[in-house]
Structures are given as C-alpha cells and as structure tokens.
Amino acid sequence: MTTAVPPSPAAARTDLSVWPASARPAPDGDVAVGGVPLAEAAERFGTPLYLLDEYEVRERCRTYLRSFPDTDVLYAAKAFLCHALLHWVREEGLGLDVCSAGELEYAVAAGFPSDRIVLHGNAKSPQDLEAALRLGVGRVVIDSAWEIARIAAPVPAGTRQKVLVRVVPGVSAGGHVAIRTGTDDQKFGLSVADGGAEHAVARILDQPRLELVGLHCHIGSQITEPGPYVTALRTVVALLARIRDRHGTVLPELDLGGGHAVAHRPGETALDIPALGARVRRELAASCAGAGLPVPRLAVEPGRALVGPAGVALYRVLAVKRTGARAFVAVDGGMSDNPRPALYGARYAPRLVGRRTTAAPRTATVVGRHCEAGDVLAADVALPGDVRPGDLIAVPVAGAYHLSMASSYNAVGRPPVVAVADGRARLLVRRESLADIRSRDVGL
Ligand code: LLP
C-alpha cells in the first residue's frame, strides 16, 4: 500500500487538475477559465455565478466519439440543460437522453432533432407520453410493464413507436446509494433475475404499434471502473440471446446508459473514457460471438462526464466566523444552487481566487447563506488563513447536477450561467430575479 503524500500548500494552491483544461493561474492570484479571469467575470455578471467552458464540453464530446466509434453518444440532459449547450452537443454529433416532457420540449424548441432523442422515466406522465408522440421522439424506454399499453394506445394506426426495455442486471455500482440503479432494490427498470424483463419483452412483441429495437440498462452514477459495465453487458447479452431463442427476434440495439465518474477533487479517480470504450466494445464483440448474436448498435448516455468538469461556480464571501475549533466561510450561494453535498455528501475543492495571498492555509468549512445548518458546500477544506468578506471562492467541477437540481429556497434566486471561450464571456442563462419568483404567485 502506498501512503498519499499531502500536497504542499503552494502545490495545492496551483493544482488545477480537476479544472477545465483551459484554466490558468492569472495575475494577482486569480484563475482564468476559457481566457476569462474569474474576478472579471464576477465583476461583470455578479455572484453567485456559473461559468461553462464551451471548448471543454466540445472536447469531452469528441473524446466520447473517438472512444466509442459506431456508437450513439447521447447527452443525458438532466445533468444540465440550456439552449447553447444543446447546440454544442448537437453540433458535435451527439444525441440526447431526456426524462420528461419538459426536457423534451426544451430540446425540440432549441432545434434538437427529435428522432435523435431517447425518452426515459420510471413514471411517465400522460403529458410525457403525449409530448413524445407529438414531437416524434426517436425511442421511448419502457420502464414498467404497466406503461406498455399506455404507450401503444395513442400511436396512430399503421405506424410504430420504437421502444427499448430498461432492464436491471443485478450489478451494484455507483458513488452513493441514491444513485445506484443496477440492482432490484430500487425503482428503475425491469428485473432480469425475476423474469420481469422477459415478460415485458414478450408483451411488447405482441403490440403491433410498438417496435422493440433493443434493451437499455443504466446501472448508476459516479462509477469509476469499467468492470461493472462489463458485468452488466454480459447479463444483457445473455438476455438478448434468450429473447432470440424464445421469440426468434434479434434485437438490434443496446443502450448501456451513463454514470461515468468524474473527479471532483485533485487525486480522485475519474472513469477513463477511452479505456471504457475499448473494454466495452471488446467485451460486447466477445459476448455476442459467444452467443452467436450479431453485435448490436451500441448507445451510451453520459451526463456528468460531458459537462461536470466544464463548469465552475463562483461565489462571494459574505461572512467569516470562528466557533470553537471550526472556521466557517459563508458565501452568497449554497444548497439552492448546489444541493449535492446535502444530498450525497459530495465533496468539493473550493479555492480562493481574485486576490494574491501568502497566508498559510487553514481548515475551514464553506457554507451557504440558507437558513439551515446543513447548508454546507465544502466541509473541512484548506483555504488561506486570511480569507475575508468580499473574497471570491471558486468551486470547480460544478457543471453537472448543480443548476439542474437548483431551487429558489429562501427566494434567493438561481444564478446565471455564462459561457467562456477565447477570452470572451457571454451570458447564456440570466439570473433568476425576485420578479421571476413572484410571478408564479397569482395571489389571494
Ligand atoms: N442515463 C440514465 C437513464 C440516467 O438515469 C442517468 C442519470 C444518466 C444516463 C446520466 O448519468 P451520469 O453520466 O450523469 O452519471 N443527481 C445525481 C445524479 C443522478 C443521476 C440520475 N441519472 C448527482 O448529482 O450525482
């Protein structure tokens, strides 16, 4: 076993390993992302602020396409959704995974071709299904036997809706219990072990208005190794073979979902995408050869790994307080823009930016401005000992599942999003104002 050597304070201050590749130390202790100094962005757009590095997103899309040739790479829109981002991923050649009528309408309104969109959901509402059919979604992923007839009923006679069946392969993987979906003790999918998946397949094959094109499986999120994907893949290929044997139907598609881990702090493990691509494709070819099946068209659905590391959250310090042994650094955002620490115990590596300091690091807890003690953004992190109100704190790896899960708690309003590229910053999503929040309240 090797013992990790803690980085020296100076190294820790300059370690930008989990930041976007464009991140550079800038004059006066600042950091620039996409060529834009963070202090300048804070000045221009205010705080809290989210920055999204356009080239980082595009480069991550390209890494997937290179690592998974002959594969449909679908961006999981739940990670973060806005018009510009949809435009970038579509331009790069990706499809899309959505899980509600809202995400679907958003994407189609932004010009995303509906036939390249896959609709998920363990409990699709009538509105979800109506939107899917009206907008001509490419594939609907069936998640329960109950929805088979509901999806088929409104399909116009003489046409067929393409569907996949989401199966649960019995693989436990993922960074937190709330984001593990590969075993039978959670709400998603149809079990391979208890025959639920095969039963659903038989029923769908009996529906003349549904075209079963393949199987889908998403085993969880923040998975750091290819191993669980390989195990799941073998189970799913075995099921494809049983379906062929029983029904004489060879399903042409296999969607392996997303869940590819990113590092939130220096030294953490990210899933190696080229290694995953090589391993999965090799195993798929071998399993199919073993079962005498043609290799199905593969799809993957990364969310976090495409946008997480491209995002940086920027906050202004409002208060610094010492109580007993702890130092609290309170910033102008919090659990309303990033609920992940409260939900999953997620850990981040915040950093002082916009000012030079030689003060020795001290352990501090970065908290938000919301009215509960659990509003913690980063517990027990090293920050310069002289951090004070007015300072800027940046949190890297903030591009996924922050703003898509943000709330208007305490009527604080959700932060704006700015794209950075080539030294320019442009507003993509404006700040949520009090007027926005009040406008939904229609009165007495
Ligand atoms: N495909 C399906 C069917 C999914 O349910 C998900 C995520 C993905 C793809 C994309 O997973 P990713 O590559 O982003 O891990 N809010 C949690 C994550 C929940 C993910 C839910 N499903 C978090 O902040 O960690």
Image (cartoon, helix red, strand yellow):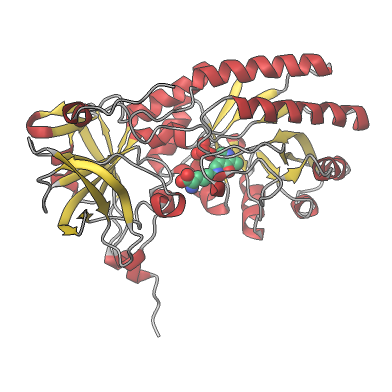
Q: Can the viewer see residue 274 in this picture?
A: yes
Residue furthest to the bottom in view is: 444
95 to the left or right of 331: right
Q: Is residue 184 placed above or below 434 in the rendered structure?
A: above
Residue at 39% x, 23% y: name it. Answer: 59
Residue 137: percent from left, percent from top: 63, 42
Q: Can the viewer see residue 107 in this picture?
A: no
Q: How many marks?
A: 0
Depth check: 394 or 301 in front?
Answer: 394
Q: Is residue 224 placed above or below 147 in the rendered structure?
A: above
Residue 18: percent from left, percent from top: 33, 30
392 to the left or right of 287: left
State which quadrant residue 233 falls in: top right
Depth check: 345 or 424 in front?
Answer: 345
Residue at 12% x, 44% y: name it. Answer: 385
Residue at 57% x, 51% y: name it. Answer: 100
Quadrant of the frame with the N terminus: top left
Residue 145: percent from left, percent from top: 79, 51
Depth check: 267 or 42 in front?
Answer: 267
State which quadrant residue 339 falls in: bottom left
Quadrant of the frame with the C terminus: bottom left
Q: Is residue 109 placed above or below 410 in the rendered structure?
A: above
State which quadrant residue 393 falls in: top left
Depth check: 163 or 381 in front?
Answer: 381
